[in-house]
Image (cartoon, rainbow, N blue to C red):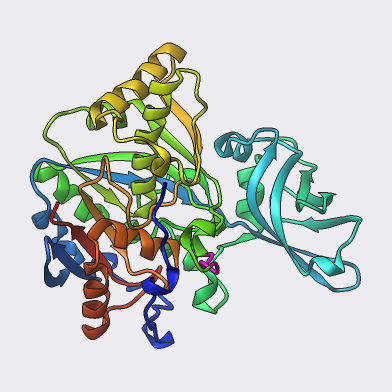
Amino acid sequence: MPPQINVSEYTYDLPDERIAKFPLEDRSASKLLFYNKGSIEHLRFKSIPSLLPENTSLYFNNTKVIPARLAFQKPTGAVIEIFLLQPTLPSPVISVAMEAKSPVVWKCMIGNAKRWKEGVLERNIELEGTTVKVEIKRMGTAEVQLSWDKSAARFVDVVDAIGKTPLPPYLHREAIENDKKTYQTVYSEKDGAVAAPTAGLHFTDEVISQLGSKNIVTNFLTLHVSAGTFQPIKTETAQDHVMHSEQIIIRRENLEQLLEPGRFNVAVGTTSMRTLESTYWYGVMLKQDQNAAFEIPKLFPYEQSAAIPSMSESMQAVLNKMDKLGVDELVGTTEIFIFPGYQFRVVNGLITNFHQPNSTLILLVAAFVGDDWRKVYCEALASDYRFLSYGDSSLLIPGK
């Protein structure tokens, strides 16, 4: 059973002026706190290729932030905002839904919902004269149907034409045009996230090319970040917090790299870490039941006995599943909740930004580096680091 975690023990004071409201012009010029087995150095992010061992495998999350905030105006003048969360039709698989033609159905958060109980809202957009219609399908679960009159247009085209960048609420500002570029990693590819995997925002093409010259292997997997990443923990104990399900995609080349002996696995961001660790636990599930669905429950890792497979055995089980299905990638979901007491099975190092107090991500960092998480955050505050999504970075290598 999981240990009882009192959330109040994992908070800190974050003054508003320490929250980075805008990014640096040069992504790689951000500060980098290098935590290496208890010691701390203060560097710049562009030096990160020199800090990683030559046998490092870096795992990037190549999700792409979609402009998920869609505004519609009623004839009365009231503005209704549709915040896209998860597709249901024509497919719950985000990549399929983004390529779909009219109509589509999505679970959403609805802003100003009390002003929109029924009826169809319309909006004309600059996409070959397209008219987009939005209709409530099920208010209880906030499902809406979106349709448009140009059948050749894909949903991703419609969203790009009318949507706004879904900036984190703690920035307390409206998105500007430049956010479409800066709130996106340079390697983003797979449309579907409503929040950026922010650890990757510091990488430039130049830094990535330097990794190759040092024989550091780069890998790309996918976790479509949900709005739940911003939800603070409001319960007294961590176990009672509701984790939002997020869609993940693991590929054959990821598994083959993980099975290569002697690699030092570094996750670029907490989303990559959660994907890698979730994949391990899917392998455990497959060892128990070869027909197990790729759905990782919140507390599954804490409910297992000590006699569980090694990392290589588990990843081989997932690879065998791919072979059986004749596919090169698997789409799953994860609600995995990593907090102190969790035993990491895959990841040796973590590149990550500095996170909100009372958040699931603080608990993840505390699980990874132990009690030194507070030392790391005190050092960052004392050294004038910029915090949260557009802030500075850290490379964490625990003494394990």
**In the drawing, does residue 334 fall left or right of residue 99?**
left
**Placement of 386 over or under 1, stated as above or below:** below
Residue at horizontal 70%, vertical 46%? 106
Residue at horizontal 69%, vertical 39%? 88
**In the drawing, does residue 22 fall left or right of residue 236?**
left
Depth check: 206 or 70 in front? 70
Q: x and y percent of residue 50 in the render?
A: 8, 56
Q: x and y percent of residue 157 in the render?
A: 62, 46
Q: Is 213 one of the magenta-colored residues?
A: no
Q: x and y percent of residue 142 in the render?
A: 76, 53
Q: x and y percent of residue 305 in the render?
A: 35, 35
Depth check: 135 or 240 in front? 240
Depth check: 143 or 23 in front? 143
Q: Quadrant of residue 189?
A: top left
**What residue span does the magenta drawing correspond to?**
231-235
The answer, for residue 203, to whether it is visible in the render is: no
Residue at horizontal 54%, vertical 67%? 235
**Placement of 105 over or under 160, stated as above or below:** above
**Placement of 392 over or under 181, stated as above or below:** below
Q: Is 233 one of the magenta-colored residues?
A: yes
Residue at horizontal 57%, vertical 39%? 94
**In the drawing, does residue 321 fall left or right of residue 225?**
left
* Secondary structure character of the magenta stretch overall: loop
**In the drawing, does residue 80 fall left or right of residue 251?**
right
The answer, for residue 260, to whether it is visible in the render is: yes
Number of labels in the image equals 0
